[in-house]
Amino acid sequence: MSTDNTAVGERHHAHHFNNAEHEFNTSMFGVWCFLLTEILMFGGLFVGYFIFHNLYPDMFAEGASHLDWRYGATNTLVLLMSSFTMVLSIYYARKNNTKMISWCLFITLLCAIAFMGIKYIEYSHKIHEGLLPGELFSYAHAEAANLGLYFSFYFMMTGLHGSHVLVGMGLITWILIRARRGEFNEHYYTPVEGVGLFWHLVDLIWIYLFPLLYLVG
Amino acid sequence: MLIMELFMNLFFNQALANTAIDQVESQSSNFMPPAATEIAQKFDTLYTFLLVISFISSVLVIGGMIYLAYKSRRKTEDQKTAYIAHNATLEFLWSFIPFVFFMIVFAWGWVIFYQMQNAPKDAFEVHVTGQKWYWDFTYKSGKTSSGEFVVPADTNIKLIMTSRDVLHSFFIPAFRIKQDVIPGRFTTLWFRAPKVGEYQVFCTEYCGDNHSAMLAKVKVLPKADFELWLQDNPYKGLSLAQVGQKVYQGRCIACHLTTEKKNIGPGFGGLYGKTREFNEADSLVADEEYIRESILNPNAKIVKGYPKGVMPTFAGQLKENELSGIIEYIKTLKK
Amino acid sequence: MYSTPGKNYLNEASGLWSWLTTKDHKRIGVMYMISVMIFFAIGGAFAMLIRTELFSSGKDIVDAAVYNQFMTFHGAIMVFMVIIPGIPAIFGNFFLPLQLGAKDVAFPRVNLMSWYCLIIGAAISFVSLIYNGADTGWTFYTPYSIGTDNGTLWLVLGAFVMGFSSILTGLNFVVTVHKLRAPGMTFFRMPLFVWSLYATAIIQIIATPVLGITLLLLAAERILGIGVFDPKLGGDPVLFQHFFWFYSHPAVYIMILPAMGVISELITTYSRKVIFGYKAIAFSSLGIAAVSFFVWGHHMFVSGQSSLAGIIFSFLTMLVGVPTAIKTFNWVATLYKGSVKFDSPMLYALGFIFLFTIGGVTGIILAVTALDVHFHDTYFVVAHFHYVMVGGTLMALMGAFFYWLPKMFGKLYYEAGARLSFVFIFLGFNVTFFPQFVLGAMGMPRRYYSYLPEYQLLNRVSTLGAYTIGIGFLIALAVILHSIFKGKPAGKNPWGAKTLEWEADEIPIHENFAVQPVVTGGPYEYR
C-alpha cells in the first residue's frame, strides 16, 4: 500500500502523480488558486474601504493623520527586504546550497519579527489614546463624528494582514527546520516555493495597505 | 389560452372559496389580492402574461419529457438508440426564443418598475416610521397615527420612511408595492388609490419575535372625510381609558395581551396592583409611577423571566394624555 | 502493481482511526455521506417543526422566539451543511477522480482537512444552541444580527469555518481537473458531471472568501462593535446585503450546478444514449458560473439600492435564464429515440426536470423587477427556491444515491422501495410547495410565525405535504441502509453506463484502477 511522499529513488512524489515534476506543477497550481481566495477575501475589505472612503473622505483623512507614516514606511521596507531574501532562498534551493537556504529564511523570519514589533508599538500607541474601532473609540479630540469607523478599517485590515504575517512566520519556521535537515535541493523545493508565493502575497497586500491607510488625504 | 384560464379559475376557486377573504373584487384569475391601484392593474397584466407563458412553456417541456420518455421506453434489453449528438438549428432556436421572451418581460417590467419608483412631484407626503413591532404615521399637520394609515382617495401619496431600530419592509399587497425601511436613511414609496377601502399592510423584512404581528391597515377615505379626519382630535369625546385603549391597539398590542398571559412582554390583565418580581431590583407593587417608568424607561426594571432590552422606549412618542390613558386602560383590565 | 486480490477501499484498513485519518477520496466521500445525512435529518426535523407550527394561525406548539430559531437553524443547516457540501463533497469526492481516471484528488490531505472543517464548523454552529440559539434567519441581515441577544456569533463563526471546507474542496477539484486527467482524457471527453463540478469549484474558490470576510466583519461587529454595518456608528446595513449576496447568489449555483451534472449522467445512462448537445451543456455550466457573480442585486430590488442597479441586475439575471433553459431542453431532447428504463434514479431525474422547470419559470417571474416588488420576501420566493433547491438539488442527490450506491458499496438496492420513496417525495413536495406560490401571490410574507386567517387552508395543505415528504425520506433511508447491509452484489456495471468509474472494480481498490485507463472517446458513446 502506497502513501504520500513515497520516495522513488531520489525523486519524491505521491502515488497519484506521474513524477516529481507533475507533483510540483500541480502543487504550484493549487497554491495559486489558494492565493486567489486570499486576494478575494482581502478584496471584500478593500471594497468596504473604498465605499466608506468615498462617503467620508475628510473623516478618513483625519484618521490617517493619527498614523505615523514613518512606521508604515519602515514596515514596507522591512517586508520588501523579507520578500527579497525569500526569493534568494528559492534561488539557493535550486543551487543545492542548503546552508544559504537556511540563512535566507532566517533573515526573512527576522524581518517578519521586526514587522510585528513595529506593529505592536503602533497598536499600543493607538490603544493608549483610545483610537479604537467603532463603539470602543474613546479619543476626546476627534473632529469627525464617526472617526471610529476609520479605525475599524485600520484594525480589521492591519489585523487580518498581521494574522497572515503570523501564519507566514509559522510556515517559514517550518520550512526553515526542514531546510536545516537538508530536505530541499534542486529536485525538491515545493514547500519553499509555495511558502514564498504566500509570503509575496502578504507583502503585496501591505504595499496596498500602506498608502491607503497612512498616506490617504 | 382558454385551457389556461379554465385551469386557473378552477384552481383559484377551489383554493379560495373556502377561505374567509371578504374581498369582493377578487374576480381576477391570477391568485392575487384585488388590484386597488392603476399600477397594481398594470402589474397584474404583466403577471398574467408571464403566468400564461410560463404555463405553456412548462407544459411543453414537461409534457414533451413525459411523451418522449414514454415513447422511447425500453422494450427490449438490446434496443438500439439513435446517435444524435447535436442539431445546430434546434439549439439556436431554443436559445434564441427564450432569450427574446426574457427581453420582452424584462423591458415590460422595467417600464412598470420605473413608474413604481418615481413618485409624482405633487404628491401628498406622509412620514412613516417602523419600529419593533408597529408602524407610525406622521402627517405634515403634526397629526400622528399608529397602526392605521389614513389617506385620501384618488390622491398621490408619497411615503417617506425610516426605522428606529432594525430593517423593516413596508408592503401593501393590494397596491403591489413594497420597500425596505432602513435605520439612518430615508426610503420612499408612492401610490394612488382611486377607491375608498381598507387594505392590509405587512412587514416583510424579518425583524424579530413579533415580525408577523407588525401589521397595519391602509384606510382610504373620501377626500372630504380625510380633511375632517386630519383636523379632528382623535380622542375627542373619549374617556381616558378609551384613549388608552386606542393607544394600546396602535402600539402595545403586538407584544402585550389584555389577559394575564405572557406574549413577548407581560400581559396587561390584572397588572395594576400586582406585586412584580424583578431580576435586579426589589419587588414592588405595580402602581401608576411603575407603569409610567416601564413605558418611558423600559430597561430600568426587568420582570423575572423576561430578557432585557426587548422593549424600546416610548419617551417622546407619547403625549401626557396618552400615557395617562394607557395607565387608566390597564386599570380597567382584570385577570 | 499495487493491488492485492480481494482488497478494496473499504477493507484495505479497518478501525475508526483508519477512517478518521484516511486520505483516500472515496473514504472521505463516504464520511461526507454519513455527516451530510445526519445534518439532513436535523435540518429536516426543524422543517417538520416549522410546518407543524404553521398548521394554524397563531400558536400551535411553540412561541415566536422559538419558531424563529427553528426557521434559522433549518435554513443554516440545509444551506451550509447539506446542500452546499451535498453533491460535490459526497459524490464529487468519490467519483470525480474515478471519472477522470485519476488515482486520487490532487491534494488528499487538504481533502481530509476540508471534511474536518465541515465537522468543526458544524460543531461550532451547534454551540449557539447552548447560548440561547440564534434567530436571525440564515441570511444574518444587519443590524438585527448585531443587536439580537443570543448565540448568533457562534452560528456566524461556524459558517465561517464551514466556508473553508467549501473552498478547499473547490480548490482540490479545480487542480485535479486541470492536472490529473488520465491519458487521452481531454477536456471535451470529460463526463458532464465533472464539467459541472469544475464550474462549481470555480465559484467556490472565488465567492466563498467574500462570505468569509463578510462573516468575519459581522463577528467583529458583535464582539468589538466596529460599526461598518451599524447605522448608529455611521455604517451601512445595506452594504452587508451586498457582501452577503455577492457570495450567496453564486452559492445557489454551487448548490444547483452539481445537481445538473448528476442529471446529465442519469439521463444518458438510463436512455442508453449519447447526450444531446454535450458542448452546449458544458459551456452553459461555465456560462452560468461566470454570470452568477453579477446578479446578486436581484435579491435587493426593494432594499434601497438604486433603480439603475435594479434594472442592470434584472437584465443580467435574464441572461442566466438562457443557459439554464438550454440545459433543460438538451436533457429532454436526449430522451428522443433512446431506450428509457424507469429505474428510480431515472424517476428522480425526470422528477428533477419537472420540478426544476417550475422553479425556473417562477425564477423568471421573480427576475422581472416590477413583479419582484410584490413577490419579494413572500411565500412565492419560499416556494420558488424550494422548487429549485429541493425539487432540483435534493432530487438529484437522491437520484445520485441510488445510481452510485452499487459502485460505492458494491450492492444493489431494493428497486420497489426506492420507487416508493420517489412517489412520496415527489407528490409530497408538490403538495407542500405549490400552495406556497399561491400564498405568496396572495401576499403572505415569509418568516411569519403567525398569519391572517385567510391563509390557513393552504398552510394546512402545505403542512400535510411536508409530512408526506418526511415519510418519503424515511423510506429512502431504509432502502439505502438495506442496500448497504443486505443488498445483493451489484457487479461491476449494473446499469451498462459508459463513464470510467464503472470500469473500476465492483468496489474500487485504493488506487481506483489496477491498470491506468487510457481514454479514446467521449463519455457517452452508446452506439
Image (tube, coloured by chain):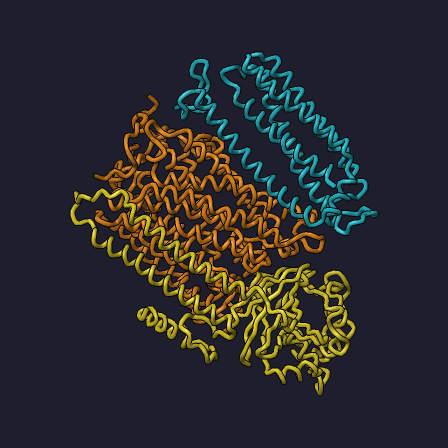
Residue drawn at x 66%, y 32% as measured from the top left: A207
Residue drawn at x 27%, y 37% as measured from the top left: C498
Quarter assignment of residue C32:
top left
In this view, A78 is above or below C319: above
Chain yellow in the figure, letter? B
Q: In this rendering, would C169 be left or right of B230?
A: left
Residue drawn at x 47%, y 38% as measured from the top left: C170
In this view, B259 is above or below A98: below
Number of numbered discs: 0
Q: Nearer the viewer, residue B259 or A103?
A: A103
**Residue B231 visible here:** yes
Q: The C terminus of chain A lies in which quarter of the figure?
A: top right
Quarter assignment of residue C12:
top left
Image hue for chain A: cyan
**Residue C383 visible here:** no
Quarter assignment of residue C210:
top right
In this view, C458 is above or below C26: below
Chain orange in the figure, letter? C
Task: Give residue C320's position: percent from left, percent from top.
Answer: 43, 50
Task: Give residue B335's position: percent from left, percent from top.
Answer: 65, 78
Q: Residue furthest right?
A: A141
